[in-house]
Image (cartoon, rainbow, N blue to C red):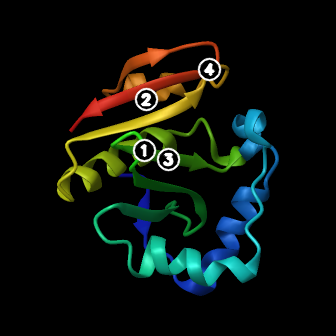
């Protein structure tokens, strides 16, 4: 594995703030507003539910490369409305096209399976080519329309 999964310390949430604020990294999210504010006053409640006490319905880790640099994040959460687990892989733009996305997605699938999850989904903007990364890694297209490509993988 190229990447190490790191359970972030509270003091390391600066990286998530920077990741969510990076315009190039978050360009995939343009349809829904692009960058995502992550103000420090929200850190405590976010950290409590995603890292400190996530229960079985959430998982979150930073991605660290061999130079001990944070390069992205992986996560999944249970979507009650749709009764599915949605996954999330974000690699900082300057670290893309180095195999990190594949490594991150494979490690996320292993973690989900080890945590008893049978199927992972992701809904990707139709104009985002990253859905091909999912297809290369055992996901299939469940459905698609002009806005969304919904991929899924049985673990």
Task: Residue 151: give its label.
Answer: none
Mark 4 vs 1, N-terminal side: 1
Q: Residue at x 45, y 75 (%)?
A: 51
Quarter location, residue 114 = bottom left
Q: What residue is shown with label 4? A: 126
Query: How far apart are labels 3 and 2 at the CA level?
Result: 11 Å
Q: Is 58 on the left or on the right of 43, as rendered?
A: left
Tag 2: Cα neighbours inside 10 Å, few (<14), some, or many (≥20)? Answer: many
Task: Please state if 147 lies on the left or on the right of 120 as rendered.
Answer: right
The earlier-in-sequence mark between 1 and 2 is 1
Residue farthest toward the front in the current orientation of the protein: 81
Which numbered tag is attached to residue 81? 1
Q: Position of residue 43 (x, y in %)?
A: 64, 79
Q: Residue drawn at (44%, 56%), measured in percent from left and top?
A: 3
Ranked by sequence position, the earlier of labels 3 and 1 is: 1
Q: Earlier in the sequence, mark 3 or mark 4?
A: 3
Placement of 45 over or under 67, stated as above or below: below
Q: Quadrant of the C terminus?
A: top left
Q: Which residue is mark 2?
A: 134
Above/below status of 7 relative to 72: below
Secondary structure under tag 4 reads loop
Contact between labelled residues 4 and 2, with CB atoms less than 8 Å apart: no
Residue 132 position, x and y percent, is 50, 22
What is the spatial separation of the Cα atoms under label 3 and label 4, in whole angstroms?
A: 16 Å
Quarter of image, res 24: top right
Label 4 CA crowd tier, 10 Å (few <14, some 14–19, many 20+): some
The residue wearing badge 3 is 88
Mark 2 or 4 closer to N-term? 4
Nearer the N terminus, badge 3 or badge 2?
Answer: 3
Q: What is the crowding at mark 3: few (fewer than 14 residues within 10 Å), some, or many (at least 20)?
A: some
């Amino acid at each position: 594995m190229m990447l190490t999964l790191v359970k972030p310390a509270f003091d390391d949430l600066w990286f998530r703030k920077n990741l969510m604020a990076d315009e190039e990294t978050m360009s995939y999210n343009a349809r829904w507003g692009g960058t995502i504010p992550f103000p420090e006053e929200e850190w405590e409640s976010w950290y409590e539910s995603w890292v400190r006490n996530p229960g079985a319905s959430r998982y979150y880790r930073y991605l660290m490369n061999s130079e001990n640099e944070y390069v992205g994040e992986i996560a999944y959460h249970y979507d009650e409305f749709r009764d599915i687990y949605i996954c999330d892989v974000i690699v900082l733009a300057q670290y893309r096209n180095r195999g990190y996305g594949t490594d991150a997605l494979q490690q996320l699938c292993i973690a989900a399976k080890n945590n008893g999850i049978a199927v992972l989904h992701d809904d990707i903007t139709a104009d985002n080519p990253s859905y091909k990364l999912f297809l290369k890694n055992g996901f299939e297209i469940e459905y698609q329309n002009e806005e969304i490509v919904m991929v899924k993988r049985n673990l």
